[in-house]
Each structure stands twice: as C-alpha cells, then as structure tokens.
Image: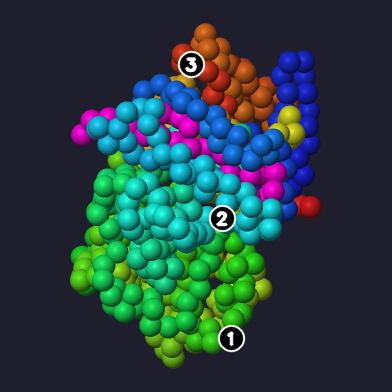
Amino acid sequence: MHRQGTWITARRGVRSALFAAALVTGCAGPANEKPPATASASSPRAGASAPGSAVQILLREEVVPGKLSVTVYSHSLSTPEGPLHFWTYVSEGLWSLGQREIRFSVKREPDDAEGVFDRQLFELYGLVYELAEQGKIVDVHGRSQLGGPPLLGRDDFHCIIYGPPVPVEGIAANAPFLSAVMVTCEEEDVGGQAGYARILARLGAQASHYPTPFWTDRKRPSVARPGETDQTLITKGSRRHVRGASVRLERKGGLANASPTQSFFVPGDRIVLRVLPRGLDNLKSAAASEGNEDGLILMLEMDPSSGTGLYWYPGQTVASAITSPAAAGDRITGNFLILAGKKDVSKAGVAEDGFVMMFPLATWKRIREALVSGKEITIPGQGEMPAFVVEHVQTTYVNPIDGKRYESETGWDTAKPEGGAAAQKRNDQVEAALVLLTNEQDIAKRTTVDDLSEVVKQIIAIVEAQVGTSKGPGTDLLVECELLPGKKKKLEMAQRPTVDQPFAQAIYEKIEKIVAPEVKGPVKFQVVFKIRGGSPPGP
C-alpha cells in the first residue's frame, strides 16, 4: 500500500473533512482486538456466505472447563438443487492461545435427525487445545493427521485440511477462525506434495461451490487419484508451500476471452503474485533457499478475491475452472506458480492448475533478488507474454475519523468502480476508487448492488462535473457516505494536500441532494478521487 501526501482535517459545523490513511479499496468490517503475535488478523470478508434458513443453537459444551467451549449450530444453504442442511461446530477459547478458532461444518444426510450430531468432534477440539498450549499452531493450509478411530463414521477420514475462514450467515465471528474440512489421507498426501489448493479446488468443483465447500460431505467420493503425485510436474523439482501468498491471472473477459492464436494468453494479461503480510517471510525464505537459483516452484493458497479457480485431474489436457456465479471472472486463481530463468527465453503458459513463466536470465535474476529482499517488482508484458507483478498487499486499514481498524484477509486492493458503479466517464482529470467499510455479507443483506451502485455513480458524476476543465495542482478528494434506514444518509468529505473550501462545499451540497435508497441497516463506503493525477508525494 503506497502512501502519499499529508492529510489535513478541516471541520465546519456538522460537515467535516475526512482523510483516509491510504487510497485503497477492499471490503471489511471492524477488526477484532489486537491478536496475539503468533497469528494473523481475522477476515470478515473471506469466502462466501451461506444464506438459508434460520440458524439454531443445538448445544454449547465446555470441552476444557473454563477455557474452551464448542457450540453446535443447525443451519441450511439454499442451492438450485434444493436446500442443504448442516451441523456447524464453533470453538471459543483457542484464540487466547494464539490459535485461530476452528469451525467444522458437516453436511447432514436426509435421514439425519437435526439433534443427532457427532460428539466425537469434541474430543478433537480438546486435542487441538492441548497442542495449542504447547505452541503447536495450525493456520490456513495447515493439516492434521489423527490416529485412533476414523472421524464421522467414515473409515478413511483420518486427516484434516484447514482452509481460510468462510462466514456463515447467522453465526457470529467473535475471533479469527479457520474452516476445517475432513479429507482422506490420500487426499491430504496429494495436497502435501502438490498443493492444498489443488484438493480444495477439486472439492469446490465436485460440490459446485466456489471456491471450495465450507463443509465436509461424508458421502462424497475421493478427489485423489492413485499414483497421481508421480504424474504432476510440481513434484519434478524442489518446491515450497508458501502460506500467505497466492497467484492469479488478471484478464478482462476472463477465460471466455480466449487467444486467437495457440497461446493461452492475450495481450494485456497480468500474472500477479499477491503477498500478504503473513506470507512475506515465507516467500523470502523460499526464494533464498539453496537450489532455487535457477527457478522456483511455489505451492500457494487460493486467492479468495478471485471469482474463478483452476482445477486439474491427471489426464486433463485443457484448463478446467470453477467460477462463482456472482463474479465477473476477470481474476483466475491457480494452485501454483513456477518461475524460472533461461538464456534468451521469454514464455509463459498454464499447466495443470497453475502458471509457468520463464524469463531471460537477467530478468529472472532481478525477480529473484526482489523476492529475496521482500520488494515488489513489475515486469511489463510483451505481445502474448503476460506482465508479471509481485504485489505486497496490506490487510489493515485505519479510518482516521474514528480510529477504527478494518481487517480484510484478502487484502486491500486499489481498484476502480466497474459496471453499474462506474459513471460514464466524462472527465479524464478524475480517477475514482471505492472503499467499502461495511463487510460484503452485511451489504448483501441490507441493500442491493443496483441501489448501492447508483449512489456511487451519482457521486462520481458530481465530482467529475465540478472538476470540469479546471486548472491547478493535483489533489486527492475523499467522500464518505453512510446509508441509513429511512432513506437517510451521513456525509463527510476530505481533500489533500490542502482544503479548497468553495470546491468541497459545492460538491458537498450536490451530493447531499442525492436521494438515498432504503436500506435494512447501515451501509458505509468511501469514494476516493485522484484529481489531476492526485496530490504530490510526501512524508
């Protein structure tokens, strides 16, 4: 996240100037209290919500008296094939040890009575607590292999994969958590050797749920294939799991925008290695490891901000993908990234469920040096060779007006409003970006995309019209709007490096006249404008 200029606050009566700490966009909610140093912050945004029937609490049990409790919920998810019913187990007490809380969701079968859930999982929670007391912590793409009897009555369920947090509507997240999925040990072995995103994406394709189901299906077939770890290119060389990093292809039009030539890529494509704060040291260590001088094989997490994910089975010769029906599909995430250097070679491709990029030796050396030193880098694209970008993404945003911290596990990206939220551009002197300060799940419950987009579009049009063809130095303008029930709204504004009061006042008065849509609860967002290139760099 790049910062520039110095924000100056100015107030006039009930109208105020608000200045953001960075020009970023994301979707998050207020953060939890500061977490222990051994764990990362939670994400109210990650994954997809599970709308359905009302959530019911079936039982709350103290697994470790006074220290760890587990609550079992009953809830449903609506699908085109009919509702799915679940038990979801939610822990409370692990976070005090630096271990994220853990959720297990189990899909109920038609003959399962609602109150007849498996109590065996309580013993598992007790074991996790004991390990956490010893400092043995699991995180995203962690795994557990258990001895003793199998889990959930299935003979081959002896292993667990821990995925990113997936919120369930009606079940509050009072601390950071992981979504745990039961798998066979053959599936866990494939994930361990070839990337856990490979197994999670296959489960998503099998269940038709993007990016991966938050539940365990006791009746599903295995997604592992005999001997497949010998059939994948990932295991042909030294490789590293890099948690806290992901790779995605950015392409306007997504996979539907196919190359007319034999290349998979089209001009304008970008392959982006996104690195979260918790993944930076992991990536630096992988790049610096002995034996990786000529190339790297990185097994990564799925990028939760993408709307499409690659998946692969042995024998497949073309790329397959699972897509969220609500996504534009312009971002495609993969399981792995291979980077290598070769004299006078510049080429890239999609292989299995990942991306391969080969660069001339001098370029590869620059890339590796950037990875080892923890720096960002951009290698421009050329023809059908996509651009390559290493991007460090911040997960915390502090709102200066109230000091609240906002967290997003997926990070805060710079982005411009698209689709209905984008006004017909009439002024090349104005660039706009959107910051959502209400989490995506609550926005979906409280308003519609069309209503929110219409307000954003009107704000952009007002600013563009006010700027017109005016001359002057670059400046940044921020408009914060909170939509409230009863068709009410609160409005605050900011400008930097200095406040042009007549300019800001004119915009304020016009935005104040926008008719707010009806909402079922508060929806708060910011529109950040760069005018004439934005404010000059500063401390």
Mark on residue 139?
Answer: 2
- Crowding near pointer 1: few (<14 within 10 Å), some, many (20+)? few
- At mark 1, the secondary structure is loop
Residue topped by disc 3 = 520
Q: Position of residue 232 (x, y in %)?
A: 32, 75
| Residue 436 visible in the picture | no
- Residue 343: name its quadrant: bottom left
Front label number (2 vs 3)? 2
Q: Nearer the viewer, residue 178 or 450?
A: 178
Calculate the distance from the C-alpha at mark 2 to the C-alpha at mark 1. 26 Å
Which residue is pictured at 34% across the width and 48% down the height?
153
| Nearest to N terminus: mark 2 or mark 3 | 2
Which residue is pictured at 44% across the width and 68% down the height?
192
- At mark 3, the secondary structure is loop
* First to last magenta residue range: 72-101
- Crowding near pointer 3: few (<14 within 10 Å), some, many (20+)? some
Which residue is pictured at 48% across the width and 16% down the height?
520
Residue topped by disc 1 = 290
Calculate the distance from the C-alpha at mark 1 to the C-alpha at mark 3. 56 Å
| Nearest to N terminus: mark 2 or mark 1 | 2
Amino acid type, label 2:
Asp
- At mark 2, the secondary structure is loop
Which residue is pictured at 52% across the width and 48% down the height?
124
